[in-house]
Image: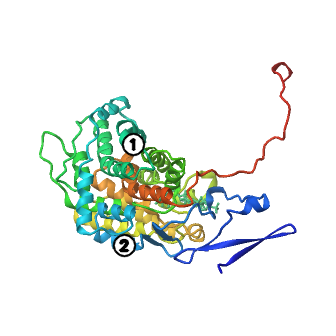
């Protein structure tokens, strides 16, 4: 017999079932609450509210644990490449060599964009933010690839998955090339995922392009640690839009828009802007920390704090280590990295941050690596989206395959005017 939660409402007592997950997390199932009591629950920002049960990613915020399909992120980061982790998240198991080769081959067949889509880029202003281009272009994929829109047709969904994962680097690189007035570089399918992307970003037709293995390895690791993170804001958006049976292109496009916000994926760009601001104003880290503690300043320490992690974000640990190794190996002195480390040291010894359990999150150090690779700042969140793509897809698939799938439609408590009668214009 599962545990029951007792709820006392006035003179009524209700028993609600308790759900226990595979890692002993507990939830009170309130799906019968309104029918039995007329009451609903309210939880601004869903701080205490679960939207689903999921078998994809496990977070333990208190202990700083992150696992994809049961595998610790630390092991995946050093042993896999991003395509392998994408397979794991989407299909639930690490692929055999044959499965991985077949998956890579399927992705290779879809790296090109429909040629007519390149005209899209002429329509955007040169200084358009690449996240706006990304969400628009991903949504527009549904107009060029109308043979893969039906969310209930497994073959069409499979084709849509290959197209999204394979084309995102091409779409992203094209937006960068357009912004700097250079010609698009077509994907080259003899290269791996990260090699292909960096070549499309930085090669030019008039010179040979040399693959930089250090930068390829660093990018591969960054994409892996961004690949999924259970029910975060953008993933919940993908699930919510998908719950209306909108196609996968449309669901992902909505997730890209949610990720853009500086409180979410846009934080990686905001961190570097913050660190540059500190550098340009004399490097006074303590002054910035004091501003972040002062609510009236409206300043936040970007890249710090997390809804779930009340300990060091394990991804930040991994990324900071790569920063150290890459910058040392390539002898890339970056004052921004020095300032970031000093900022972390000052903040983590300050009671305000200690009491609120605010630690560096995934976005705090990732921009240092993107800068070292030569990625422009306004592309940082685009790379977050590239990494998160397999996670969004896996979560969307799990939602569609769930026996209890229903359209997501939250309730509310009305606090507006009671009924009143219409007044004609000349009586107002
Ligand atoms: C990502 O959900 C995910 O998993 C997201 C993500 C993923 O992989 O998908 O991990 C990616 O989005 C990481 C977070 C990136 N965002 C930032 O770095 C922006 C800065 N951080 C925050 O704004 C904030 O910490 C959030 C948005 C991340 C979390 O916000 P919460 O959980 O709603 O917490 P809160 O805003 O209620 O803060 C609690 C307290 C408040 O102070 P009090 O009202 O208790 O006095 O902590 C303070 C906040 O003012 N606080 C900060 C702070 N973050 C929280 N104060 C200064 N600087 C900060 N960064």
Looking at this view, is 123 or 127 the one in front? 123
Quadrant holding the C terminus: top right
In the picture, the disc for residue 309 is none
Q: Can residue 211 be seen in this view?
A: yes
Front residue of 81 and 146: 146
Left or right, 207 with reference to 355:
left
Image location of residue 14, percent across then percent down: 78, 70
Secondary-structure class at tag 1: helix
Name the residue rendered at 54%, 47% in the picture. Answer: 244
> Is residue 175 found left or right of 399 in the rendered image?
left
Residue 227, position in %: x, y?
39, 60
The answer to which image quadrant residue 334 occupies is bottom left
Residue 211: % across, % down: 17, 55
The picture quadrant where one finds residue 389 is: bottom left
Please name the residue shown 52% across and 48% down the image: 241
Judged from this view, the residue extending furthest toward the bottom is 1
Residue at (37% x, 44% y) in the render: 148
Query: Is 28 left, or right, of 338 in this rendering?
Result: right
Q: Residue at the location (71% across, 63% down)? A: 32
Classify 136 as above or below 209.
above
Residue identifier under label 2: 74
Label 2's element? helix
**Residue 26 x %, y %:** 61, 74
- Which quarter is ligand 1 in? bottom right
Work out which residue is located at the far top of the displayed protein and give it. Answer: 426
- Where does label 1 land, which residue? 138
Callout 1 crowding tier (Cα within 10 Å): few <14, some 14–19, many ≥20: many
Colour setting: rainbow
Q: In which quarter of the image is residue 77?
A: bottom left
Q: Mark 1 or mark 2: which comes first in sequence?
A: 2
């Amino acid at each position: 017999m599962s545990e029951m939660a007792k709820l006392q409402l006035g003179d009524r007592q209700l028993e609600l079932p308790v759900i226990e997950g595979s890692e002993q997390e507990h939830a009170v199932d309130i799906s019968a609450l309104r029918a039995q009591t007329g009451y609903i629950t309210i939880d601004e920002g869903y701080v205490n509210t679960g939207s689903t049960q999921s078998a994809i990613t496990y977070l333990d915020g208190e202990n700083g644990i992150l696992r994809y399909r049961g595998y610790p992120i630390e092991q995946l980061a050093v042993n896999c490449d991003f395509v392998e982790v994408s397979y794991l998240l989407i299909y639930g198991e690490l692929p055999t060599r044959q499965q991985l080769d077949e998956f890579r081959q399927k992705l290779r067949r879809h790296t090109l964009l429909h040629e007519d889509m390149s005209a899209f880029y002429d329509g955007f202003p040169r200084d358009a933010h690449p996240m706006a281009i990304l969400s628009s272009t991903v949504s527009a994929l549904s107009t060029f690839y109308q043979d893969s829109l039906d969310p209930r047709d497994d073959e069409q969904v499979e084709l849509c998955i290959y197209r999204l994962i394979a084309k995102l680097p091409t779409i992203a690189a094209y937006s960068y090339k357009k912004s700097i007035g250079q010609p698009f570089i077509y994907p080259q399918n003899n290269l791996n995922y990260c090699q292909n992307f960096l070549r499309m970003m930085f090669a030019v037709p008039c010179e040979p392009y040399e693959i930089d293995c250090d930068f390829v390895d660093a990018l591969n690791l960054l994409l892996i640690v961004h690949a999924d993170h259970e029910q975060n804001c953008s993933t919940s958006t993908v699930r919510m839009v998908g719950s209306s049976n909108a196609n996968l292109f449309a669901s992902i496009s909505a997730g890209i828009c949610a990720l853009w916000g500086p409180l979410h994926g846009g934080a990686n760009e905001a961190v570097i802007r913050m660190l540059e601001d500190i550098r340009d104003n004399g490097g006074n880290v303590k002054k910035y920390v004091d501003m972040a503690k002062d609510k009236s300043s409206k300043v936040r320490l970007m890249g710090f704090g997390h809804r779930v992690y009340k300990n060091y974000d394990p991804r930040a640990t991994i990324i900071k280590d790569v920063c150290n190794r890459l910058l040392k190996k390539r002898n890339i002195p970056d004052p921004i990295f020095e300032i970031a480390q000093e900022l972390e040291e000052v903040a983590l010894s300050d009671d305000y941050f200690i009491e609120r359990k605010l630690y560096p999150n995934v976005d705090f150090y990732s921009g240092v690596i993107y800068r070292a690779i030569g990625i422009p700042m306004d592309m940082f969140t685009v790379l977050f989206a590239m990494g998160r793509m397999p996670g969004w897809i896996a979560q969307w698939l799990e939602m569609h395959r769930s026996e209890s799938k229903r359209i997501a439609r939250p309730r509310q408590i009305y606090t507006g005017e009671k009924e009143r009668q219409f007044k004609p214009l000349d009586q107002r």
